[in-house]
Image: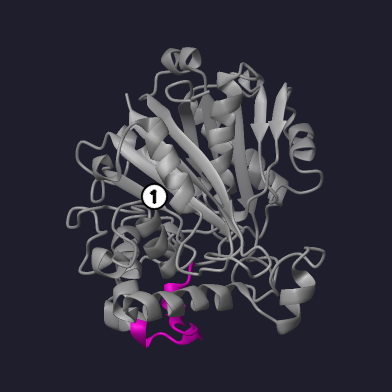
Amino acid sequence: MSIKGKAYIGGVFEHPIREATDQSTPQLHAECAKGALADAGLIRDDVDGYFCAGDAPGFGAMSMIDYMGLKVRHMDSTETGGSSYILHVGHAAEAIAAGKCSVALVTLAGRPRQMRGGGLGGGRAMGPSEAPEAGFENIYGGTTHNVYGMCAMRHMYEYGTTSEQLAWIKVAASHHAQWNPHALLREVVTVEEVLASPIIASPLHRLDCCVITDGGGAVIVVSPEVARSLKRPLVKIIGSAEAPKGPRGGGDLDLTFSAGAWSGPAAFAEAGVTPADIKYASIYDSFTITVLMQLEDLGFCAKGDGGRFVADGALISGIGKLPFNTDGGGLCNNHPTNRGGITKVIEAVRQLRGEAHPKVQVPSCDLAIAHGTGGFLGARHGAATLILERE
């Protein structure tokens, strides 16, 4: 069953906070929910479906449903790391198409800056200690940075990608973040400044890495009937796909591509559009190499051409051929928990509504992609892709 045109995004909200010293994680979830409902013009009692991932405390969806006083007939707490919330918007569309709910609330929130040692940048050993691969991998003390550094190093070896090319991704994000009053990093940087920042996991520099912030966001997914009753621009979900990728015990390890090589084409096929049709791209940016590999895997350029594709400002709104992450993304704006994909959906909706900052708004933006990967890029992870259209 295709979900094309069977669900719409009715409301979005990005929490403005970046340091949650006085709020709890459940409180942030609830504040995001309230903001998204207000944006849609709905109330709490309208919600009959709830979606969250592993950032929700306690018993996940059950705890948050109780905390927020929701009465729902459908819930989902699938966990796929950074791609979770792009996946959940797709799952909400599927549930609505199947008649399981008509107003789905999706919330993310976290406080990694208050949880010292946690989050994507906390230097934790890879993966939960009970994961099946833990005894084979964690004993070497690997961290998230190391894995992404290996992906970048392999991509450079295979295709001649350079640190200068990767740096252009950070430069583009910084050009956009300067117009976002809530972004953690608002200063525009140069390629030279990225390369001068300390090496974190060779060949990745500190400015190749995303920020770590507190905060969160929420999305309201609704049926076509509900969408047309709201006084908001109509943003239709026309394509959705997800895919896992793993090394399968080391027998199938290729660090140069992500699961987006499967989720991307499937989402484009359902939507009936091509990468050339896309006006704006929200791409998960835990590291600069994450963006480069996903652009290749999604078909915006050939495998190995990502470095040349992103160079010289190609991702900067108003200058380049593919404006991306016009809120500053994870590289400059925010990255609450290690599941920041929800902000990719939020900014894509802003662009399609014509509500992005005037300095970064893409003219005549009618088609956008939101895509993310969660886990360890190139190795064990999952990807999710959404194609959205302004009706």
Residue 158 colored in magenta in the image: no
> Which residue is drawn at the image coordinates 34% and 31% (left, top)?
272
In this picture, is 302 found above or below 270?
A: below
In this picture, is 256 found above or below 297?
A: below
Q: Quadrant of the C terminus?
A: top left
Q: Amino acid at mark 1?
A: Ser
CA neighbours of label 1 inside 10 A, class few (<14), some (14 to 19), many (20+): many
- The residue carrying mark 1 is 282
In the rendered image, residue 291, in percent from the top left (x then y), is placed at 40, 62
Residue 34 visible, this angle? no
Q: Secondary structure at mark 1?
A: strand
Magenta-highlighted residues: 195-210
In this picture, is 23 found above or below 306?
A: above
Total labels: the figure holds 1
371 displayed left or right of 364? right
- In-front residue for pair 218/126: 126
- In-front residue for pair 140/315: 140
In the rendered image, residue 132, in percent from the top left (x then y), is placed at 78, 63
